[in-house]
Amino acid sequence: MTAAAPSGSRGPRLVRDRLTWAGYLLLGLWAFFLYGFGPTVPLVGAELGVSRALSGLHGTAMAVGAVVAGLAGSAVVARLGRRLVLWSGVLGISAGLLLYVGGRSLPVTLAGALVAGTAGSFLVNTVNAVLADDHGSAAPAALSQANAMASGVGTVAPLVVGAAVAVGLGWRAGLLVLLPLAAAVYLSFRTVPVPEQLPVHRDAHPGGVRRLPAAYWVSWGVLVCVIAIEFCLSLWSGDLLRTRFALPPGYATASWGAVLAGMTVSRLLGSRWTARHAVDALLLRSLGVLLVGFAVFWAAPVAWLAVVGLVVAGLGMGLQYPLTIGRALHASAGRTDLASARASLGAGLAVGLGPFALGALADSFSVRAAFLLVPALALVAMAGLLASRRRLGVAG
């Protein structure tokens, strides 16, 4: 990725080859699991008869997997190669799914979340690095489109799960739809060559090839905040709708699809916006939109208006992950595999601590009061962006 993308200048035309489409669809598989999994966590907790805080440990288990991928990711990719890591990731997500849906005790469902979280994090890290290397200065557009594909597929997941609950099949039947989808992607793209990362020369980077610049870590901190926000809303927004408006579980679960619809729209438009506007300016605006949507969701007196607020929040959230990960990879000085792995470590912290903290606050106070954690994280992210713009001289 060149300096042109973050500075806000018009980027080159994005050309999508088979490798690009493979990356898009692999992220789509992970999104189907992830966004289908999130709304089922309170349902699993209710089935097992555990508290919200203990239910939130499913997010923590996935976070542990992300931390494992973050610590070991670059070494594993260097040893096994990107292609094997990608397809092993698909297999691992499928295995974790089977454990999760088949579990009838908390340790088993947590184990499923851990396996899926580890495999999914390896897959996401590798796809991000491959797309960044393959598209160079067009990487922000590619990453935005990849995440648009992911959130578009993810939009279907809570609808499928919610429909399965509503017709009496249960949430497990909805999640199991992932297995034939994964098989179809593997059969269609298993022969696509996956290039390895180009070597990084020590003499070009005096700090040593394993060090990441300070600019990367600034983006890493912002990434932690925006991922925590997304997962807090993913895991607990349905619970707030159920407790506050007495929505049936199937409808409350499916409501997360409204957020994903908003995210998909903004990510589709994002590939154009990144060619015309500075990344940091877009990120600040997206956080502002998120805060507006959250305020509507939190204060709404009726369920339909709360869902509208979630859609607006989704419009804001849509650009936050792809732009922040693109910002971080751009600042990695060519170490895309290492940068993606360390981003996974941050994602693990966000996924593990954010939803668990919200669940614990909900047990101590109320779900509605606990949700004030979301605007607090958004304000921290905005402060980090503003501070880094002054410190690093980011334009726009």
Image (cartoon, rainbow, N blue to C red):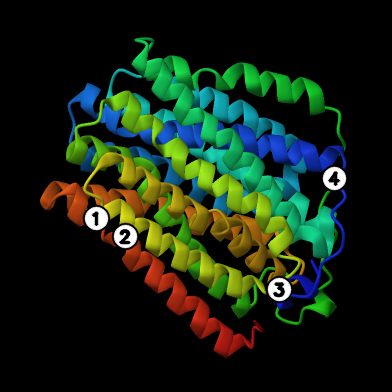
Q: How many marks?
A: 4
Q: CA distance from mark 2 to mark 4?
A: 38 Å
Identified by mark 4, the residue type is Arg
Q: Are marks 1 and 2 in contact (CB under 8 Å)?
A: yes
Give residue 4's position: percent from left, percent from top.
79, 74
Query: Residue 16 got which mark?
Result: 4
Query: Residue 299 got which mark?
Result: 1
Q: Is residue 66 left or right of residue 80?
A: left
Chain-order first, disc 2 or disc 4: 4
53 above or below 33?
Answer: below
Task: Pick the residue in front: 116 or 370.
Answer: 370
Any part of residue 100 in sight: no
310 above or below 84?
Answer: below
Q: CA distance from mark 3 to mark 1?
A: 36 Å
Any part of residue 344 in sight: yes
319 above or below 191?
Answer: below
Q: Are marks 2 and 3 in contact (CB under 8 Å)?
A: no
Q: CA distance from mark 4 to mark 1?
A: 42 Å
Task: Pick the residue in front: 52 or 118.
Answer: 52
Q: CA distance from mark 4 to mark 3?
A: 21 Å
Q: Residue at x 60, y 38 (%)?
A: 152
Identified by mark 1, the residue type is Ala
Q: Residue at x 51, y 18 (%)?
A: 176
Residue receiving disc 3: 6
Chain-order first, disc 2 or disc 3: 3
**Crowd rating for badge 2 (residues with CA inside 10 Å; few <14, some 14–19, many 20+):** some
Q: Which mark is in front, 2 or 4?
A: 2
260 above or below 348?
Answer: above
**Crowd rating for badge 1 (residues with CA inside 10 Å; few <14, some 14–19, many 20+):** few
Residue receiving disc 2: 295
Q: CA distance from mark 2 to mark 3?
A: 30 Å
Quadrant of the rendering where the N terminus is positioned: bottom right
